[in-house]
Amino acid sequence: MRGAAAWQLEVRPAPVDIPDTLLVVLGGRWRIDQDLPSADTLKARLAAPVRRLGFDASGLTDWDSGLLTFVAGIGKSCADLGIAVDASGLPPGAQRLLAMATAVPEQKLAGRDGGAQGTFARVGEATLEFFRGAPQMLGFLGEVVLSLLRLVSGRARFRARDLWLEIEEVGPRALPIVSVISFLVGLILAYLGADQLKLVGAQIFIADLVAIGMVREVGALMTGIIIAGRTGAAFAAQLGTMQVNEEIDAYKVLGISAIDFLVLPRMLALMLMVPLLTLYSGFIGMLAGLLVSVTIFDIGVFEYYTETLRALEFKQFAVGLSKGTVYGAMIAFAGCLRGMQCGRSAEAVGHAATSAVVTAILLITIAASIMTIVYYQLGI
Amino acid sequence: MNAAPHIDVRDLSLGYGDFVVQRGLDFTVDKGDIFVVMGGNGCGKTTLMRALVGLQRPVGGSVRYSGEDFWSAGAETQQRLKRRLGILFQGGALWSSLTLAENVALPIAEYTGLPPARVDEIVAFKLALVGLAGFEDFYPSELSGGMKKRAGLARAMALDPEILVIDEPSSGLDPLTARRLDELIMELRDSLGTTFVVVTHELASILSIGNNSIYLDSESRTMIATGHPQDALKNGHPKVRHFLTRGGTL
């Protein structure tokens, strides 16, 4: 047994005195798990006078696609250089497999430029993509508005059960996470306020700060962000999967509006439940503020309670609830939009979910800024 | 009835953006035909199907149903023409949040004013027809691939459409189930006069049920044969015979 673990390769002119014919002599073991030579190592030998190339594989003990890739690589180089390859010296099995691999010529596909793109090209692509996305978003917005109008005029059709399922999923099941986050945010607000108010000896106003802050602004914002991550992503994934399964197409072909049937119940569920969660979030936040004030800053429970009642006017609730409703609509819009735009693969569904959260948070932030300015100008 | 052919496709070009998948498609489908669209993988069969049922606007050309051009028509006409169609998607495309019975019932409830009890009867009958009696309350995720496909057919037939478009009826089905499906298609044609457009590359189906066909070629990007599949097998274009004999000729 001569070195069964090793491959042997020799390249020589053959017959000896004819320089335009090369013989590649292969010996030993050529398997894919070995450190085999690359076909490129032979390139230097394929220079000018060579016109023909043959193989001698009589010394070969063992082979698999390690050998085939090597030979196919040589074949490709030879084809580029116009060198004729005679494969008859190879084992018959190898000859057949190589013939199969070359039977269908390589496809030159249109529109598949695999080359790496420069940074500028990618920035350009992304910008164009963004502007292409805007009309789509507006188109979807238009469809949703039309669907809402159909709902108001009593012509939109969806199943009440779907609405209830969504309401249950969005509302009660979100309570634990909304409780935890709201409690902690209320705690932070109280500490933050106490620190500043201590300077002027007006610690009792912690109650005002927490109450107004939570009810008017922070409750809605926190709930919005939680629901965007929890439900917005779920909407995008659900609709995206339906897109992959051609379920949305099945609605279209039947002439049933997928917007009415799928988007509307989700939109309504969020527009109903996010304001309620906002209210709840404000309440929990105030509870946290009370706890901090009583235990750490020596404010009486009753004192805190009356101060809170004094601070909270109806308009604070109105602002908080209106923001909650708008955020809910934004989350449902972003989630359903990204779901409906989803491509037809598992990867696209994941992308839709991610994109839904990003879009929802962006829309919430924009809406929050606009509403804050408008309410300020209106003196609410 | 007017004399215009049931489905008339003229100079249809299909594509995505700048990329043309098929061009110059010309064919007619008569009432009661089982029209087979055949061709290798990736030749544009499914794209053609999507253009026929109104899911993807063709790049050029026309699709006429009894003389009415679908793609240049207004939304209302399109809606009316779509109602004449039933479609079975490749994976069944059942609505995942509804049970089988609800899946089949939805189109009926949407388009007819039938009382619920009557709808239930129709649903039960359609499911029995595809061999799924007793599965009314199952959700699609609880079914095997073949059952989903049969349930999809039950939904497609819900409104007794004049034309049933079926994408890959037998892919993923065992030979016996596939044959049962073929028999069901022929029976529906014979008894109800339904016209079928079947997109497939299942040879047994093509040769046993088809009475008219086109072959889409992916290299020349157009149709290279039309007519009865048996004729195409005997004296059609060499490529089509090559296809219909699994490469046995040529």
Image (cartoon, coloured by chain):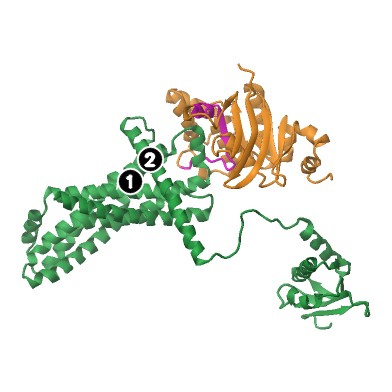
Verify whether residue B98 appears in magenta. Answer: no
Q: Where in the figure is residue B16, as x and y percent of width and height? A: 58, 46
Q: Chain of mark 2?
A: A
Q: Where in the figure is residue A369, as x and y percent of width and height? A: 25, 55
Region rendered in magenta = B77-96
Q: Which of the two discs, 1 and 2, labels the residue nearer the N terminus?
A: 2
| Marks 1 & 2 on one chain | yes
What shade has chain A been given?
green
What shade has chain B been given?
orange
Which amino acid type is shown beneath numbered disc 1?
Glu
- Between disc 1 and disc 2, the foreground one is 2
**Image position of A94 with respect to A235: above or below:** below
Which amino acid type is shown beneath numbered disc 2?
Gly
**Image position of A344 with respect to A83: above or below:** above
Identify the residue at image location x=61%, y=41%.
Answer: B14
**Image position of B39 with respect to A115: above or below:** above
Q: Which mark is residue A168?
A: 1
Image-based side of A244 in relation to A206, left or right: right
Q: Secondary structure at mark 2?
A: helix
Of the 4 image quadrants, the one containing the C terminus of chain B is: top right
Q: Where in the figure is residue B122, as x and y percent of width and height? A: 51, 26
Q: Which mark is residue B104?
A: none
Quadrant hosting residue B2:
top right
Identify the residue at image location x=76%, y=71%.
Answer: A70
**Image position of B90 with respect to A286: above or below:** above
